Structure formats: C-alpha cells, structure tokens
Image (cartoon, grey):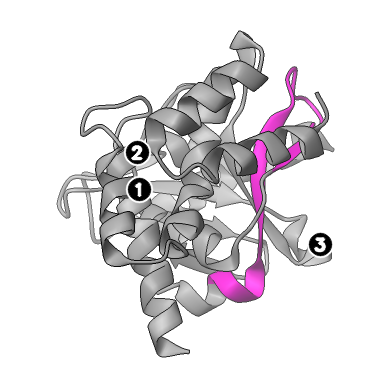
Amino acid sequence: MFKDDLHRGQMVEQEFLDRLLPAFHDAYRIFGKDSRADIVVPELGILIEVKYDPASADTGNIVIEYYHNKPSALTVTAADYWLISTGDEELWVTPKGLYELIIELGLDPVRIHGPGDSHAKWVFLIPISHIRRVSA
Amino acid sequence: MRPSEFRQVIKNAAGKADYPSCIAYLEEKLPAEMMELARHTLPYYLPRVIVDLPDKAARRKAIDSIPDVSYPEHTKDFVKLGVQKLWKANVQR
C-alpha cells in the first residue's frame, strides 16, 4: 500500500504537470530525494510542491512534515505554493500560510513512522477544514 | 525520549522567551543528537510565548534576542511572522 501511494503521488505530480503544459510549455518536474520542490513553471517564475495525502479523507487531517532525520518538507521547501491533493480535492496554500496556520491553531508536532520510512518523522496534523479556510 | 517529553522540553525552553536562554535550556536538557530537531521545533512555540509577554518592550526584547543570522535560517523571520499572526488574531477577537 505504501508503494501504491508513492506511485500514485508521482502520478498526481505528472497529471498536474500535464494540465499545466498546454499553457506553460516550459514547466517541468524536478526529480530527486532531496529536491525542495516538485514542479517548476519558468513562465511564472514559481516552484510548486505537490503533496498527495489520500489518508486525509479518513483522518480529516493533512500531514505536514517538517523533520525526517534532518530538516525536511515545510522546513526546507523552496516552493512558492503547495498543491495538496487528497484524492477528492485540491487545495492551494503557501508555506507561509501553513506556518501561520500551525501557529494560529497552537498545534503540537507529533512523531509518526510511516510505512516505508526508515526513520520516524515529525509532522503537524492540520485539520483539512482549516487548510480549506486559508487555501486559494 | 517520548514525544510528549520532548514537546514539554520545547515548551519549557520557549517559556524563557529570550532566545539564547531557550537554546541553553535545550542544550542542558536534550542529548546532542536531538538538538537539530529541537532548534527546528522551537520556532513553532516561541510566538505564543512572546505574544503573551506583558508589554511591547518585553516582546521587542524577546524578538531582538534572536540573532539575525541563526540556525535554522530565518528563525527570526518565522517567529516575527508567528507573533504578527497571533497578534492580529487577538485583535480581531
């Protein structure tokens, strides 16, 4: 199931890129484990992070990682926008918006160990209703 | 260390408000291998502590205690952003 989600996540990135290409011909995906964004849109000068979180449909929370054996995800993102795909909907947020939301809600970080992870990671669980509130 | 214990250490550190004191507390309480995680978690707790300080001078002093150049990068910017967000939310209530 982990590999299915990983594969599906990569498909979501590609599907999104395919939607961009008719208008933004130079857009492309960035590959690599330590990349700080997933998609570049040179015509707009922006970087996009694509997050696929299908479990949020059951949990009601979006998992926002910030530390996974080293600073990661929200801590290191270079993306201007995050596209969060739950499988049912797509939400656009900025990293600044996510940080402000975490502070506003007074969320405590939690440690989780996802399938396929060799190390535990530290994340914030943000209720999807709040992400909807701040999304574009 | 259990996550709940780690979070309590971070909260206690943040409660000091003065950034060098926060870091010194973390270094006293945590093993060295947890310091990087601690430094990256502290900015999520500091804003609320700073907003609750009794006056503007105290809040300004706490923010200014964060070095302009620090690790993690942009700690001061993040904390200022968080303080501004909480301040606006308080004003709107």
**How much space separates mark 1 and mark 3, taking CA atoms?**
28 Å
Q: Secondary structure at mark 2?
A: helix
- Chain letter of disc 2 in the image: B
Few, some or many residues within 10 Å of mark 1 (<14, 14–19, 20+): some
| Residue A63 within the magenta-colored segment of the rendering | no
Q: Amino acid at mark 1?
A: Phe
Q: Is residue B77 left or right of residue B13?
A: left
**How much space separates mark 1 and mark 2, taking CA atoms?**
5 Å
> Can you give x and y, in whole percent of width and height, for residue A130 in the image?
59, 73
> At 72% from the left edge and 56% from the top edge, which residue is drawn?
A54
**Do marks 1 and 2 share a chain?**
yes
- Chain letter of disc 1 in the image: B
Can residue B46 be seen in the rendering of this structure?
yes
Q: Which residue is mark 1?
A: B78
Q: Which residue is mark 2?
A: B75
Location of residue B74 (image quadrant): top left
**Do marks 2 and 3 share a chain?**
no
Q: Secondary structure at mark 1?
A: helix
> At 36% from the left edge and 77% from the top edge, which residue is drawn?
B88
- Chain letter of disc 3 in the image: A
Q: Quadrant of the C terminus of chain A?
A: bottom left
**How much space separates mark 2 and mark 3, taking CA atoms?**
31 Å
Front: mark 2 or 3: 2
Q: How many marks?
A: 3
In magenta, the rendered stretch is A110-131
Q: Is residue B46 left or right of residue A45?
A: right
> Can you give x and y, in whole percent of width and height, for residue B29 in the image?
66, 21
**Foreground residue among B14 and B53:** B53
Residue A59's tag is 3
